[in-house]
Amino acid sequence: MLCVVPSYWPAFIFGGPVFSVHAMNKALVAKGVEVTVYTTAAGLSGKVPLNLPVDVDGVKVTYFSHLRSLDFLTATGWQFSPRLSSALKRGLSAFDAVYIVGAWNYPTIIAADYCRRHKIPYIVSPRGLLYPYSMKKGFWRKKLLYELFVKSNFSRAQGVHYTTEDEAQKCHSSLGFKNKPFVIPLGIDPEEFDKLPGRLAMEGFYPQLKGKKVVLFLGRITWKKGLDILIKAFANLAKTDDTLHLLIAGNDEAGYISKVRGWIDDFGVSGKVTLPGLLRGEKKAAVLSGSDVFVLPSYSENFGIAVLEAMAAGLAVIISDQVGIYQDIAKHQAGLVVSAEVSSLEKGMQKMLNDQGLRKKMIDNAIILVKDKFSLDRMAVDMVGMFEQSMVYH
């Protein structure tokens, strides 16, 4: 299987897809699938070898050089790569199926085009990029690219992989796609969260959190995450509770952190908010296991891999009803689902923070849900089935 993706591990600045796609590929390798990745060195300048295959956790990855002169075409960069194009021309026939992640970038567009030219079956996965709310951002630029390339690439694929039922319902039929929608959730390895360092480790890294009720946000610092809602709701609660502290952890995207800092100052909670940047390794494990509540109040979110990590870590979660997995969370009472607006989030946070019995019930349900439905092993089995079906359809 060939996986084509604009950016790849360890380009952590690009957030969830970088983690989830590599985790998927490793799980497929464990199932006996030979996985090759064609990607670019976006976000990895000087950190990876260029234009030659390297082994990354058993996955054969080639980071192709790319030109940046056309990066203005999309918010995450166009990532125009003649070398990737040449490799696709030469090597596509060696693969049984191709899996393409994304929509707007050059690698995804050219890969779908060459697959059709060479009659190679391919699956495309938008990862939330075709959600109505997301489509409104940069509408005219996206509209042009959609009509020129993206619509054809998706509609002529052997299938479209959505990571939630919500994404499939809101995107597939509304965009007029007649091919098969595959709904396969993302996954994590629950065993990675069995032994976490706990509260003392978090307080060791961040002494200001000692004795506080910690509300955790973990994700990219970007427009779609609802951080304006979160900060205002938190500020309202903090007026009457001096023990509250908000931890906003994640990498800054396109300078959005300046807006976040502005809201923190405007609402007068600068002494009650910590911004540690992107967390990995021990620090990430510490805040996941040491915080009291995890919150993701996104305006648009196709899945929410950080939600799974929080659930597996035994952390009570609150998400908006615009986060793709909200239906599963609500159905299994594995967390609170709120509207993406201040009053609803504020009430949800207050309820979760003050009701210990509710937190325990939802945490217990969440741990079971992750193990039963959102494991990498289950995802890999379903992905193999999807590729087998795509080759039959072809």
Image (spheres, grey):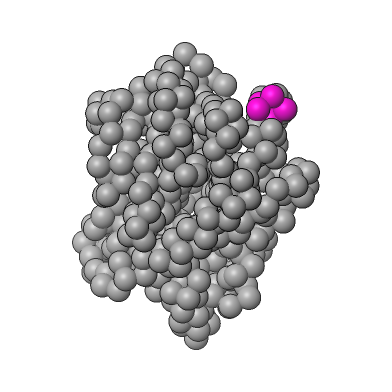
Residue at coordinates 47% horizontally, 44% vertically from top-left?
96
Residue at coordinates 34% horizontally, 55% vertically from top-left?
29
What are the residue bounds of the magenta stretch? Answer: 145-149
User: Which image quadrant is residue 37 in?
Assistant: top left
Q: Inspect the magenta stretch and tell me whether residue 147 lies in it.
A: yes
| Main SS class of the magenta portion in the image | helix
Residue 392 percent coordinates (x, y)? 59, 52
Residue positioned most to the bottom: 357
Residue 381 percent coordinates (x, y)? 46, 64
User: Which image quadrant is residue 15 in?
Assistant: top left
In the image: residue 37, left or right of residue 374: left
Residue 304 percent coordinates (x, y)? 51, 56
Is any atom of residue 23 visible in this view?
A: no
In the image: residue 321, left or right of residue 46: right
In the image: residue 171, left or right of residue 48: right
Q: Which of 365 and 389 is in front in this view?
A: 389
